[in-house]
Amino acid sequence: MTQPIITGWDIGGAHLKVAQCTQQGELRQVVEIPCPLWQGIEQLQKAVKTAQVKLLQPTQFNVITMTGELVDIFPDRQSGVTEILDCIHLFLSEECCHIYAGDLGWLTPRQAKNQWQQVASRNWQASVTFAAGQVEQGVFIDVGSTTSDIIAIDNHQAQPKAFNDFERQAISELHYAGAIRTPLIAIAHTVPFDNKTIRLAAELFATSGDCWVILDQLDPTTIQDNTADNQSWQKPDCIRRLARLLGTDAHTFPEQQWHQLAQWLAEQQIMQLQQACQTVSANHPAIPKSAPIIGAGIGRFIAQECAKRLGKDYIDFSRLTEPSSSQAADHAPAAAIALLASQQLS
């Protein structure tokens, strides 16, 4: 007899992530589908259709979280929550959907529209709540393509100090930088290059993903996002985009100099995340400085480097799932929401 399957949906502004597990908490599948929601709600419709084709089996038990309500096609976040749920209703009946609302638990779509503040951008809470079930103390860091979440864990409980994006950004629990989509001009305004200090062009010419590809930390064949110029993620194109930020061409200087520049920019991103981690840790003096960092997200190699520099042990989110899954670590909220549902709703 086929076991009932739970499907977790994490609806972002740039991607749709979907995970399936059994009611016993055995992870079966995690997929990511590009979903540039800022281009229109039809992008979400297309992504859901694609997900339904890719999933191993259909399910009548769906759990949903989101961050996509923040994209600029919506006049405000409440409208975003409502329109996203209305879109999902085209494919999944309301009766089979449970919306994650943090400490409020699981809501019906109708309840979620009324309680939208507890639904908007709560995917991080699902991830850290799942991790806290297995780690007594530590700092959870999820470095995604666009943003990073940094949340303390104490006594097997997530310990956020804030819950909405505005307040979370103010205290560094939401660090608005990721491993792929962050414009490099947001990481540094000037750079050392060719024995000069050069001010970067204030344009979206290159992103963090270009640096991490140049440094062999990201596999260009696995990146689901578009580049700044819609060309490939192969190294020559990444270097060309990096050169454009300096108002020059890649062939004007040796490749080694571009590698050094990518390394310098990557170092700035590491230090900025490390500083944010220290800010969050300082707000939780009861947690020992030796407590580990739990890393998740497509850019969790940055979190791992922070752990090394801070003298902390590192626990990869993939070790927390059964079976161990790097895809689950890449897309922790989707996996976490499905696995939490297997614990709480089965």
Image (cartoon, rainbow, N blue to C red):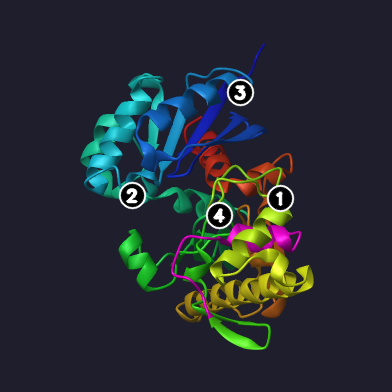
The residue that disc 3 covers is 54
Q: Position of residue 161 (x, y in %)?
A: 38, 68
Question: Vertically, is 272 above or below 86?
Answer: below
Which callout, 1 or 4, points to the residue nearer the camera?
A: 1
As rendered, which of 85 and 257 lies closer to the eye? 257
Question: Vertically, is 299 above or below 51?
Answer: below
Which residue is at a point 49% across and 22% down the rendered structure image? 49
Disc 2 is placed on an element classified as: helix
Distance, label 2 to label 4, CA atoms, is 16 Å
Q: Indicate the amino acid at tag 3.
A: Lys
Badge number at residue 234: 1
The residue that disc 4 covers is 144
The residue that disc 2 covers is 70
Which residue is at a point 58% across and 86% down the rendered structure image? 197
Question: Vertically, is 190 above or below 7?
Answer: below
Q: Earlier in the sequence, mark 3 or mark 4?
A: 3
Q: Residues within 10 Å of mark 4 (few under 14, many from 20)?
A: many
Q: Is residue 278 left or right of residue 46?
A: right
Disc 4 is placed on an element classified as: loop
